[in-house]
Amino acid sequence: MAARQVVNSVRRVAIFGGTHGNELSGVFLVNHWLKHGEEIARPGIEVRPFITNPGAVEKCVRYVDTDLNRVFDSENLRSESNSNTYEVKRAQYINSIFGPKGSEDAYDVILDLHNTTSHMGATLILENSKDDFTIQMLNYIKNSMAPLSCYVLLIEHQRLKYATTRSIAKHPIGVEVGPQPQGVLRADVLDKMRSIIKHALDFMNYFNEGKEFLPCSLEVYKVMDKVAYPRNANGDCTAFIHKNLQDQDWKELKPGDPMFFTLDGRMMAYEGDCTVYPTFINEAAYYEKNQAFTITQKMTLCAQAIRCTPPK
Amino acid sequence: MAARQVVNSVRRVAIFGGTHGNELSGVFLVNHWLKHGEEIARPGIEVRPFITNPGAVEKCVRYVDTDLNRVFDSENLRSESNSNTYEVKRAQYINSIFGPKGSEDAYDVILDLHNTTSHMGATLILENSKDDFTIQMLNYIKNSMAPLSCYVLLIEHQRLKYATTRSIAKHPIGVEVGPQPQGVLRADVLDKMRSIIKHALDFMNYFNEGKEFLPCSLEVYKVMDKVAYPRNANGDCTAFIHKNLQDQDWKELKPGDPMFFTLDGRMMAYEGDCTVYPTFINEAAYYEKNQAFTITQKMTLCAQAIRCTPPK
């Protein structure tokens, strides 16, 4: 018989928008909910919409000084240096409200809203493969989104994991919807993001009401590696995403398949050992990170049944 | 019998990239051609690829201080003020090389390469409905691109026409290909732009060789008006492109058709008098210009036959 995890009820949830200031679905949804909170209200839960990087939102850029979604490590969160960037100061402020990261006082759940120029559709980002509560929530969202596809990206990786804004919560969830150009609001992308938030909040509501969520399995795409753009000695990109790979996020990429092309007409094939599932293909913000796409492998996670601690 | 215009042969052609630094197809094509000019060489024609806004290209932004593609008016080109912006200084420099605008010394043709986040496909921008040489060239390009669609946008409008970078040439041609997010290079978009340039250069080559181009008619979309985003008293957008209008560039928009939606669920319909053809729908760079889309009407231009002045 499967074990059942008993978890405390969900009391405090944050919805972050504008962690990257030019990813507009989250910016406009959070600004809307700050004025009209009924849509995200659930009984017994404090749901707090919050613009995390107002300086970047104001300028409609990804960040002012540094990427806010990479600085929530203990070194930056503790730094008292006078030369801290705008985003490091913001990170400390955000941590003081929604954290402290890793403490009992941290918010239960943070849903952090992002857009991508990649054709990733509705994507949920999971940080921890052992977090049964979050796996159950993502499974619920994914099933509720059907027949629309909803993918789960697991970013648990010793070398490639980064210190996200949402990582201060006990249960951090990234919401990544695309394709949407930076600085544009698309109705279709907004609808998907809004549905994800509705289902996430519904899940927490049912959970708090005592509903038992039975053991489940969840198909995820686990980050394995990143593929860089070929560059010349000056650091300029010399090859770009091949048309056969463009917009093919989550689809099989086999050894020998076209990966890059050059402007003088050469094709460069993928030379890995096995079939992989690329994602974040041709994301605008990753040119400066020298990341042409992310390689994932499909796997299945299992979560135990969960049920809320009965009220005392 | 139709008249025939006899025009001087084409001697000097410029191909501009990076007028907007985050529109990458032109940036990478021009940088490629600066090193590998064979592809754009044509006998007897000086074809000069040129990065117009290197400061913006370096930062991968539209512009540094002001939009370069709006400052080629006589006031800016003549201004000796110490407070001239980076782009005004660049405009004067560009005018000194490829102009002076309106003079006999100006380049014959400038092809200025742009991208848009709108679903405009391959688009050619015409500034002057009386310019038979350019109409003949665009007609040639359009026919050569078939069966791919290639649209012609005529921006001749007393109030809405603006002073483009290419306007210093005798025959200015804008090349606008989308959809492509800012800061991204897509293979499909690059291919279309590259084909347009090939056909444009081929046309000039045939023309110089003495080929007569017979009278032609060309379907164009003439700019009639711009539609602004609804805003509140703080200047914030309160409505966005409706999903029925998104990606529908060049398609009919009828009175009563959905145009905008609001985050609280309202639809706003187009209330014009007649059917129009919208374009530049949801272009990222036009949020700050408060332009949700451009309204055009379809019309047909006619051009006389043209033939090159026989060599002396």
Image (cartoon, coloured by chain):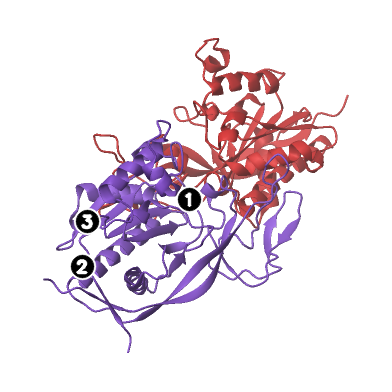
Chain colours: A red, B purple
**Quadrant where the N terminus of chain A is found in the figure:** top right
Per the image, label 3 sits on a secondary structure element best described as: strand
Q: Chain of mark 1?
A: A
At which x and y percent is residue B170? 31, 60
Residue at the extreme bottom of the image, as rendered: B1
> Badge 2 local density, few (<14 within 10 Å), some, or many (20+)?
many
Of the residues under marks 3 and 2, which one precedes in the sequence? 2
Q: Where B186 sits versus B89, above or below?
A: below
For disc 3, the marked residue is B47
* Left/right of residue A160 with respect to residue B288 in the rendered view: left
Residue B134 occupies which quadrant of the picture? bottom left
Q: Is residue A19 visible?
A: no
A155 is higher (above) or lower (below) than B297: above
Residue B286 placement (x, y as % from top left): 54, 49
Q: Position of residue B36 (x, y in %)?
A: 20, 50
Numbered mark located on residue A249 in the image: 1
Q: Is residue A187 visible?
A: yes
Q: What amino acid is labelled 2 in the image?
A: Ser
Q: Residue B9, which numbered label?
A: 2
